[in-house]
Image (cartoon, rainbow, N blue to C red):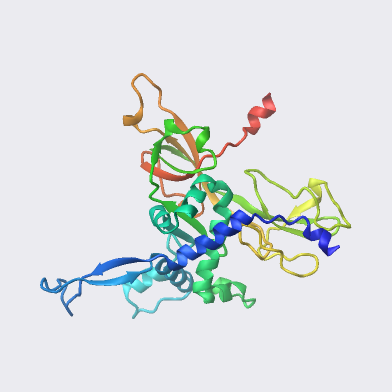
Amino acid sequence: AAGEAQAFEVVDEGGELVRVRFHEFLQNYSEIVNEQTMADGNDMADEDEDPTQRQYYPYLEQAGQLARRQLKSGSSASPDEDDEDEEEAEMSPFSSTLCVNYRHLHSYDPDLAEAIEGEYVRFEPYLRRAAKEFVLGCHPALDRANNNAGGTMKEYNVVTSYFVALYNCSTVLPVRALRTGTIGRFSAISGTVTRASDVRPELLVGSFRCKKCGLVAPDVPQQYHLTRPPLCRNPRCQNRASGEFRLEIGLGGRDGDGDAGDAGPGGGGGGGSEFVDWQRLRVQENADEIPPGSMPRTVDVVVRNEMVERAKAGDRVVLTGSLVVVPDGSALARA
């Protein structure tokens, strides 16, 4: 029976390879930076001194900043601490997002960069999983605080999901250049925000409990609408009714045998549902990009997690992500 249950698990070997190589990139990418030796007590360095060079690991540094922000977010700052420490103790707007320069990725591993650019929608969950493994691997204290049953989640504002924000794309497209060839690919567009919606919660990865046998189906990716399991994982149950699955709201859900659910591509091994904030932006092509005699074209952009409330109407922005096609449910209902 156990073998039959495992038959439903599908492993994307290409996604796993992308996860491993992206984790290696985050761990090993470095660059040589010049540092000017500062004189003690002076803001200006000696002009005769040569700049010193050192090996700089930008993503290891980012992981350290995320860990310090999370672990210090719940601690009370003492009056003797510096202003910098007090600011770092508060949750930053980017406490769970790893910002990755696409040019760094392309210079380090061109094959990986091309794979991500070509099938970004497919590989994005594996990038998030690699980012989580990277941050928790560099700072095990975050994982201990997250899994502590004593309630340290209240004491430390530790996040359970990590996101990857790629920027500095090699080509920035105008809104009018979006075509079917860009669907699913990593791309960047420029435009002007004309409208921003309210921030709402979105179910990103769901865990559903079968009402008949009680077995939990963890880490069910949501395909832009509420997506329930098509079949119960229990081979003796074989429940196929979508209405017979209940969404597990609490994080860290367990299956019927008391074991944690298997980690899916989103990286959540606890079997709990994952919610994120999302916001819809209406983006119009820039005035200087509109051909003479043409009407300006617009596109709806969905931003998630810590990218919400970062742009307002009138802002000229460059957005990186992927073009997806979402069916219009209201139009289909009227047809």
Relative to 188, residue 38 above or below: below
Furthest-front residue in this view: 111
Relative to 155, residue 14 above or below: above
Relative to 80, residue 117 above or below: above
Q: Quadrant of the N terminus?
A: bottom right
- 171 left or right, relative to 334: left
Please give the name of the residue rendered at 47% of the width and 71% of the height, measured from the top-left corner: 67
- Residue 214 in sight in this render: no
Q: Position of residue 62 (x, y in %)?
A: 41, 66
- Count numbered badges in the picture: 0
Furthest-top residue in this view: 293
Please give the name of the residue rendered at 65% of the width and 43% of the height, measured from the top-left corner: 225
- 279 left or right, relative to 103: right
- 47 left or right, relative to 284: left
Please give the name of the residue rendered at 45% of the width and 65% of the height, measured from the top-left corner: 91
Q: Quadrant of the C terminus?
A: top right
Furthest-left residue in this view: 48
Q: Position of residue 283 (x, y in %)?
A: 43, 36
- 283 left or right, relative to 316: right
Q: Nearer the viewer, residue 54 or 332?
A: 54
- Residue 294 in sight in this render: yes
Please give the name of the residue rendered at 46% of the width and 64% of the height, measured from the top-left corner: 26
Q: Quadrant of residue 125?
A: bottom right
Q: Position of residue 261 (x, y in %)?
A: 71, 64
Q: Nearer the viewer, residue 195 or 270?
A: 270
Q: Position of residue 236 (x, y in %)?
A: 89, 57
